[in-house]
Amino acid sequence: MPDLFTLPGPPLFSVPQLVETQAQRQPMAIAASSEDVQLTYGGLYELARQIASELARRGVPSGSVVAAYLPRGPHVLATQLGIWLHSCVALVIDPGLPPNRVAALIGDAQPKAIVLDGNGTGLPPGPGTIALGELKDDAWHAPRTPEADPTPAYLVYTSGSTGVPKGVLVGHRSFAHLARWHSVEYAVGRHDRASSLAATSFDAFIWETWPYLCSGASVYFAPEEVRVSPWELSDWLVAKDISIAFAPTPLAEAYIRHGSKFEQLRTLLTGGDQLRLPGGHPFRELVNHYGPTEATVVATRTPVDPAASGAIGIGWPIPSVHTLILDDDLAHVPVGQTGQLYLGGECLALGYLQDPQRTESSFIHLSGHPGRWYNTGDLVAIENSGLSFKGRADRQVKVRGVRVEPAEVEVVLAGHPSVEDVAVELDPTHSELVAFVVPSQGTTPAEGELREHAAKELPAAMVPRLYRFLDKLPLTVNGKVDRAVLTRLDQR
């Protein structure tokens, strides 16, 4: 739709405006579908309209946080849209989260209302609830559809270094920038069928749904029992004739190792962790992405060559996103050397909810570079194919007085032919590195063999002394390596 998506420059239309246009253009087309619920674009907008009217009837102020406490499915999307049509901030809370986590999110966000489809079992006492099944269609409040401006669109929580979740506020302008870029970059059209696999509480859910709805495509939600089984999910993707899909890095790597092709899939998108390939991939198009929540999901991308192997880089910034690689003194790092990545441009979030001090320290102003810049804490270097991810600055540890970045050790060990996956952590008790190794199928690497392999490329202090062999690495609900679980395993 060239009249709605024009590059470059700031976005002209907000996500709610674009979806509203699709509802007018093709009201009977499928917008979102799950095993038990299907909404057309007209139905999606009508349900959103009713939610917005109920928020208005209850006197919920514009700009307030409103939560959606709903299971994965089309109703989450309709609720988010309804919240936006009342110019409020959408917070999606997964009912599957531990009760203490739910209570912490609600306690921090202080939503003025919570939309749910049941009786709210497990919710802590607090704001009034709105049940989807009790909405009335007897009043219409004119929508306050937001523009593509910096007003807050959604709130998503990330893990904090202190163990307390951080609420990241993303504005409509950066949200619209993501949707516009994605729709243009991947030529999304009304005949596309996209999958939704991510947990709704994570920012990947925003990315794998709303850009498609802005373009008139259909979003299909994988059933819960399917999304936790790679091979059932593989069959589901084929059965639903999915044309474009996002898979977290570990899932994409699993498909690549087992030669899954998905003939109907024109594009597989991945991201979230360091992508490593054993030797090529079978897909028509595989694209690796990088971006923190504070940069509205995606900041850089790189198409992956079908013959690529080893650690895959994160590519170059997407349009209207700027990058700087700086040292600890905020000086530019020469090409090829490692430094911290700073992001600027249209992608930046507004900041952290009710935490101006953290916002000010994370989103900074740099001399000679206009605008705000976000310190990602990620270590990168410029190489031939773009940016190469080198790990986290805050994962650095000291081993026998030597500063060590565990991610660098992981890259070396992953290059051993008998290693399918690996994670390296510090054993604080003995101040030694521990390697958690998933052996390649049919192999049983010896500790001495791996130690010798690492010693060929790393200083002595960076060579793990201890090795733990696992069937698979533990993952968090959003598909990343669960390092807290690894630490507990090492303490046994």
Image (tube, rainbow, N blue to C red):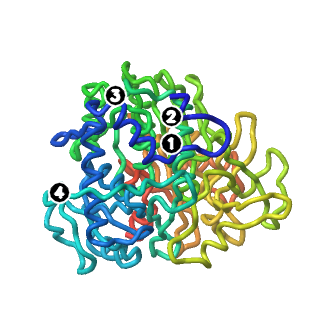
Q: Which mark is residue 179?
A: 1
Q: Which mark is residue 368?
A: none
The CA distance from mark 2 to mark 4 is 36 Å
Q: Residue 342 in the image: x percent, y percent?
A: 70, 57
Position of residue 347 relative to residue 118, above or below, is above
Q: Would you name the residue on which mark 2 appears?
A: 183
Question: Which residue type does callout 1 highlight?
Answer: Ala
Position of residue 25 relative to residue 368, above or below, is above
Q: Would you name the residue on which mark 4 appears?
A: 138
State which tag comes first along the sequence, 4 or 3.
4
Q: What is the quadrant of residue 484 in the picture?
A: bottom left
The CA distance from mark 1 to mark 3 is 19 Å
Q: Residue at x 40, y 74 (%)?
A: 109
Residue 142 located left or right of residue 364: left
Q: Residue 37 in the image: x percent, y percent?
A: 18, 42
Q: Would you name the residue on which mark 3 appears?
A: 242
Question: Which residue type does callout 4 highlight?
Answer: Asp
Q: Which element carries disc 2, helix, strand or loop?
A: helix
Residue 175 located left or right of residue 375: left
Position of residue 35 relative to residue 202, above or below, is above
State which tag comes first along the sequence, 1 or 3.
1
Q: Quadrant of the C terminus?
A: bottom left
